[in-house]
Image (cartoon, coloured by chain):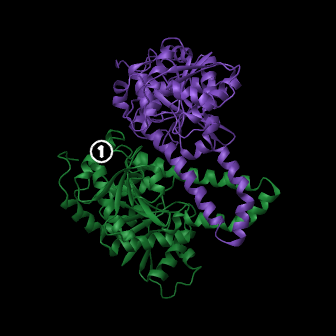
Chain colours: A purple, B green
Amino acid sequence: MRIALDAMGSDHYPVPDVYGGVLAARELNETILLVGDADVIKAELSKYDTQGLKLEIVPAAQVVTMTDKPGVVGKSKPQSSMHVGMNLVKGGLSDAFVTMGNTGAAHAIATLFTLRRIPGVKRPALSGIYPVGSGYIILLDLGANADSKPEWLAQFAVMGKIYAQNALGLPDPRIGLLSNGEEEGKGNQLIKDSSELIQRLPLNFVGNIEPKEIMQGKVDVIISDGFVGNIFVKTFEASASYISHLIRDELRRNVFSTLGALLARSAFQRVRKRTDTFEVGGAPLLGVNGVVIIGHGRSNEIAIKNAIRQASLAVKGRIIDSIREGLQQIPDLSTQDE
Amino acid sequence: MRIALDAMGSDHYPVPDVYGGVLAARELNETILLVGDADVIKAELSKYDTQGLKLEIVPAAQVVTMTDKPGVVGKSKPQSSMHVGMNLVKGGLSDAFVTMGNTGAAHAIATLFTLRRIPGVKRPALSGIYPVGSGYIILLDLGANADSKPEWLAQFAVMGKIYAQNALGLPDPRIGLLSNGEEEGKGNQLIKDSSELIQRLPLNFVGNIEPKEIMQGKVDVIISDGFVGNIFVKTFEASASYISHLIRDELRRNVFSTLGALLARSAFQRVRKRTDTFEVGGAPLLGVNGVVIIGHGRSNEIAIKNAIRQASLAVKGRIIDSIREGLQQIPDLSTQDE
């Protein structure tokens, strides 16, 4: 297997990216293609013992930054490491592409310029995988499509099922629609219409699901439009950080509490680890015609290595073929041509 | 001032409701009208020393339950304590109505059967007030309108400003639109269109705001549609509870940590108090033609007393007149007749 890695992706590229690539090559014993400025990558690689590792450098002259506009970067930077890396996948020279870079740009370059959609897919969705309780939950769409249609959400449900089977090893993952109430009939019009469509599909659909139940681990896959999904994830992260800081501040307020805080420090560290998405590293852009894994810009080398492992899982699980076949098996959800 | 209280509102009615009414009558020295089953209220009142307090009982034969459908309860239970209480306000016999009952039912009974809208208001919005950092934030809409239009959100911004001036004493509250990114152009179509409209209004509009910035206290009033607003609040509450439990569990995992947990117990209690909405008690249904304050079903007597205090603030601040005048001063936002 060959996996292309964007060496210019993370906030602190190329350091964690190249290091993560080295770690992945060692752990997985697969070929890792480091895509980006060849001199920079070579210099960075020289820091590590790469003897016996299958590492290759693929030059790319441009770098997509976090401030580049997704709408223009595909045209303005056709030699970016994202563009080049995805074209490796398109041309069959790599089995997957992994990046910690600008999510919107990766989405645009994949969808409009390089890999494009799997035939039958109406809109690709950005997925995410998060530790909750003793397991993981998969969320999509996290932001690829701010305004969505019911047919798109129904396809997200099918793609989410396949991804959960692949990444979590669940034979029949439970799928829920993120809503403001469990009862049927709750939700906005999009949720109501989507619920009706999804009910007709061969899925383990549990219906509407509220944030509280998500935290309780009552579903494996959560479907929403990209606007609501993005706000859900950002609210979870912001709330977790806010409450952790409140508790920490209060623990420091008096002598006994300070002692408590010292004793409790390792507990805080364990909580951070349990809620850390770095253990997974990244999640696929589902629906594009090739495996593309996107991780956080602030990823360290471990997160990047883990993102590459996610890519290898997706390739081994033939996730693209599975989505193509999965979508063919469901009834056509609309007559709209898009 | 006369404030009507739904004695049959909370999950454990009439106990906390009547007790809260007694506490409010004592603290505010205003007349509290207890609306509901007269015998039940009388029996409950006999437990307290009500000497010198201005407490009156207004009989209502029916009770709205938490499982009553908002769409039918206005017709099916015309003698409910909600219906009777709101009609007291409509008829000038009370200055405000306070309930801990079924929010959807209160909204429907207010909007469709009793008080109706302030002239010019397109849609009433359910507001909420939450402690964040050292201050408070006001959110609307929390769920009255799952599907909204830009003109409605623009009116919510105007009503939110007036409510923040009234309840928080801020002369020029900062108003933000809940979105998936700060940058102009982020958001779904509703947010983009609403942003354009709100920019033209005489408001201290800070533009799009992300969950993280809300927790940092960067705005005073947050505007969203009722679906997203409801999910935001529920995600915040669920995340706070989830993270608190994770930290607590981890604190208990070993001997040192257990000691830490014991010492830290008071810190946890203070955090709970700092994030507790009971300090405020309730928030208005903004846009109906009369002061209606709605609180949590699980409220205790203190929360209910505080909700009644919110009602007295709204009455003193002439919030209904202020909204009517505020809406008249802004340019007509649409030509649609609704």
SS at mark 1 in the image? loop
Q: Chain of mark 1?
A: B
Residue located farthest toward the bottom when viewing the structure as drawn: B52
| Residue appearing at x 55%, y 68% in the figure | B14
Residue B248 position in % (x across, y down): 70, 56
Quadrant of residue B265 within the rendered picture: bottom right
Q: Nearer the viewer, residue B39 or A323?
A: A323
User: What residue do we see at 56% from left, 67% from top?
Assistant: B300
Q: State which quarter of the image contains the N terminus of chain A.
A: top right
Q: Position of residue B322 (x, y in %)?
A: 26, 67
Residue farthest toward the top in the current orientation of the protein: A92
Q: Disc 1 marks which residue?
A: B149
Residue A35 in picture, x, y percent from top left:
52, 23
Height in image: B194 above or below A84?
below
The answer to which of A38 and B12 lies nearer the viewer is A38
Name the amino acid type tagged 1: Lys
Q: How many marks?
A: 1
Residue A138 in sight here: no
Instruction: Using the image, determine if residue A195 lies above or below residue A57.
Output: below
> Relative to A58, is B120 above or below?
below
Which quadrant of the figure contains the C terminus of chain A? top left
Q: Residue at x 75, y 60 (%)?
A: A263
Is residue A308 visible to the viewer in this orientation of the structure?
yes
